[in-house]
Amino acid sequence: MTDQLNQVTRETDSAMAKALDHLENELAKIRAGKANPSMLDSVYVDYYGTSTALSQIGNISTPDPRSLVIQPWEKPLLGAIEKAIVNANLGFSPQNDGNIIRINIPALTEERRNQLVKMSKSEAEQGKVAIRNIRKDMMEAVKKLVKDGLAEDEGKGGEIKVQEHTDKYIRKIDEVLAAKEKEIMTV
């Protein structure tokens, strides 16, 4: 039975780590006024009849904090890439010079920064809800183990471990959110 309790603890940590990773990925999509190649992760280009991620048909770089440069591996794709960026509705206006595509990232207004902070807080709250749901499921698993014959004091120890994991990941979410808020509000 102790092996099963250890399994529940490992599953708790693994599931909560995945929830934290998901939150970090979602927060990375919220642009803070700085150019980041991941801003174009949602852009798919018609590559000879196949919808292909932009990152797979060209090199995306950030020569400075306010611009992105896309260097396609095949020049005939410039028009298709430009069209895909516009159709992705990201609020960018790509500039095609015949060799590369340049995107200038506009500075954020104070109002937009506050909106992005609200979006970040909402994502963080969803992350916390996911952590709490994992805690609930794992607590039920521990109670089931006690019902199936695990000693009650071992069950209590398992519940304490699950709660410790929960507290640890909630703190991590708060830290990630604070870092994102600072990034957004830094002019």
Image (cartoon, helix red, strand yellow):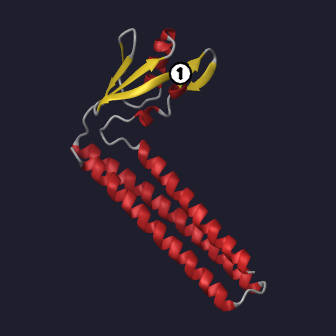
Residue sitting at x 78%, y 84% = 148
| Image position, residue 7 (x, y; %) | 69, 71
Few, some or many residues within 10 Å of mark 1 (<14, 14–19, 20+): some
Q: Residue at x 26, y 39 (%)?
A: 108
In percent of the image, x 39 and y 15: which residue is there?
100
Please tell me whether residue 106 is drawn above or below residue 180 in the rendered image: above
Give the quarter of the image for residue 16. Answer: bottom right
Whole-percent x, y for residue 23 in the image: 48, 53
In which quadrant of the rendered image does the C terminus lie? top left
Tell me: 159 left or right of 24: right
Q: Quadrant of residue 145?
A: bottom right
Tell me the residue at 36%/41% (across/down).
31
Who is closer to the viewer here, 161 or 46?
161
Mark 1 is on which residue type?
Ile
Specify the quadrant of the image occupied by residue 102: top left
Q: Which residue is mark 1?
A: 57
Q: How many marks?
A: 1
Eyeballing the image, is 133 above or below 116?
below
Residue 91 x %, y %: 37, 30
Is residue 169 depicted above or below 58 in this figure? below
Task: Using the image, determine if residue 116 lies above or below residue 83.
Answer: below
Label 1: element kind: loop
Quarter holding the N terminus is: bottom right
